[in-house]
Image (cartoon, rainbow, N blue to C red):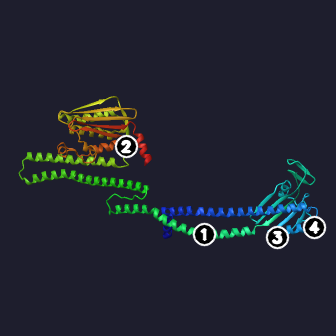
Amino acid sequence: MLEKLQRFIDKIKSLRSLRLRIFVLLLVIGTMPSLIMREVILSSYEARAVAVQSSVVQNQMKIIANHLINYNYLQDTSSAVINAEIEELSSLYDGRVLIINDHLKAVKDTYGISEGKTVVSEEIIKCFSGKSTSNYDSVNGYIELTLPITMAVTASDDETAVTGGGTTVNGEKVVGAILISIATDNIRTTVDILSARSRNLLLIAEILIILLAFFFSAILVKPLNKVTKAISEVKEGFSDDAIQVSDYAETVHIIDAFNALLARMRILDASRQDFVSNVSHELKTPITSMKVLADSLIAQEDAPVEMYREFMEDITEEIDRENKIITDLLSLVKMDKTAASLTITEVNMNELAEVVLRRLRPIARKRDIEVTFESHREVKALVDEVKISLVISNLVENAIKYNKEHGSVNVVLDADHQYMKIVVSDTGIGIPEDSLDHIYERFYRVDKSHSREIGGTGLGLAITRSAVLMHRGFIEVESVPDTGTTFTVRIPLDCRQTQNVDKDKT
C-alpha cells in the first residue's frame, strides 16, 4: 500500500516537471495549427466544390427553363426533346428534377412521385417571387436548387405586379419553377480521400513534432540542470568558486542571486568561526590568568598575607570579567532569537536617561570627564525600558572609556511626531574610517591593546545595535580620529506597531 502511494506521489511530482510542461506546450503549439489547417482546408474544399457544382447546375437549369418556355412545356409535357433533357440532367447528377407551373402543380417529376400534386415549400414561394435558392445538406449529402421560369411581358422595367397565377418582376413574369436535388457523393468521396491523406500526413507531422518537442524540451531545460548540478557541487563541497551559467538571462539572475547568497553564507560562516574563536579566547583568558595567579600562590609555601590579598583581588577582577563576558553573551543570544519579544511600556525617556547617567557619572569623575544631558522636550515613548536603558548605558559607557582625560560626553534627547532621537557624542580618541563598518561585530576592538587596559568585552555595540533593530530603529555613527565620536539613535515612539508587524510576519 505504501509503495503504491509512493508511486502515485512520484507521478504527481513528475507532472510538475518543467521539461514535461515545455514538451506539452511545444506539442500543443505544433499540433493545433496542423489540426486547424486541416479542418480549414477540408471545409474550404467542400464549400468550393458545392459552390462550383451549384453554379454549373444552375446554368443548365437556365437553359432548360428557356426551352420550357419555347416548347410551351408547362401546358403540354409531351415534348420528347424536353423530357430527354430533363432525364439527362437528372441522371447526370444522380438527382431529381421537378417542373412546377404557376398553380404550384408539379407537371414533371423524374421520380414520378409528385406529378399532378401541389408542391409548397419556402424555397418554391421564394422562387415565385423571382428569387433563386441553393441549399446544401451535408448530413444527407445533396444540394437543392430552385430557379424561376420566366417569360417577357409588356410591363414597365420597374413595375412589379401579380398577374393571373404568376408574379411579374422587372418585366419578367414568373410562370413556373424548376426544383432539382442533386447528390453530392462525388464531393463527399473526394473529401474523404483528402481527409484520409491529410490524416496520414498529420500523423507523420505529429511524430516529427513529438521528436522535436522532446529534443527542444531537453535543450531548453539543460541550463537549469547545469544550475542544479553546480549548486549540488557547492553543497557537497566540491567547488568553492562562484557559479557561472550564462545561457539565459533568467539563469544569470538565478546564479547572481545564488552567488550573492553563497558569498553571504561564507561571510556568516567566517563570522561564526571568528565568533567561536573570540568567545573561546575571551572566556579562556580570565581562566588562564586565575590559574597563573593560583599556581603562583601554591608554589610559594610561606607567601605573605599581602601577596595573598593582592593575588585574590586580581582573581576577583578576572572572575568579574568572566561574569561580564557571560552576561553580555547571554544578552546577545536572547536578542538574536527571532522569537525575542519586547516588553512594551510607556517610558519617560528624560527620567530614564537621568537614571542611567547618574549611575555612570562616578566612573566618569575618576578620569575627570564631564557628562552632560540636554533635552529639548519631555519625551514619552512606548518601548522596552530594559533594552533602551542598555542602549543608552552602552553608548555612554563607551564614550567614557574611550575618551581622553578631562574630556566630555554630551547626551541629547529629542523627538518629532514619529521618532525619538538619542545623540551621544564625546571628545575621545575616535574611530578610524576603515573600522566604522566593523564596530558592531562581536568582540571587535579598534585598538585591542588599549581595550585590554580599559576593560570591556567587545560586545557592547553588538548588543546596542540588536536592541535598536528589535525596536525597528536606526543607529548611525560619525567619528574623527583624535577628535571624537557621535552615535545617533532613532527609535519609533510607539513600538507596539513594530510588534504587530512581527506577529503578522510570523
What residue does disc 1 label?
201
**Residue 208 lies in what quarter of the image?**
bottom right
Q: Amino acid at mark 3?
A: Ser
Question: Residue 352: which disc?
Answer: none
**Residue 194 lies in what quarter of the image?**
bottom right
The residue mark sitting in front, 3 or 4, is 4
Label whose residue precedes the other's in the sequence (4 or 1): 4
Image location (x, y in percent) of residue 478: 28, 38
Task: Evaluate if marks 2 and 1 touch, with contact meaning CB atoms under 8 Å apart.
Answer: no
Instruction: Count the labels in the image.
Output: 4
What residue does disc 4 label?
78
Q: Cα distance, mark 4 to mark 1?
A: 55 Å
What residue does disc 3 label?
91
Q: Amino acid at mark 1?
A: Leu
Q: Cα distance, mark 3 to mark 4?
A: 19 Å
Q: Mark 3, residues whose alpha carbon is within 10 Å: few (<14), some, or many (≥20)?
A: some
In the image shown, does 155 or 136 lie closer to the viewer? 155
The residue mark sitting in front, 3 or 2, is 3
| Mark 2: secondary structure | loop
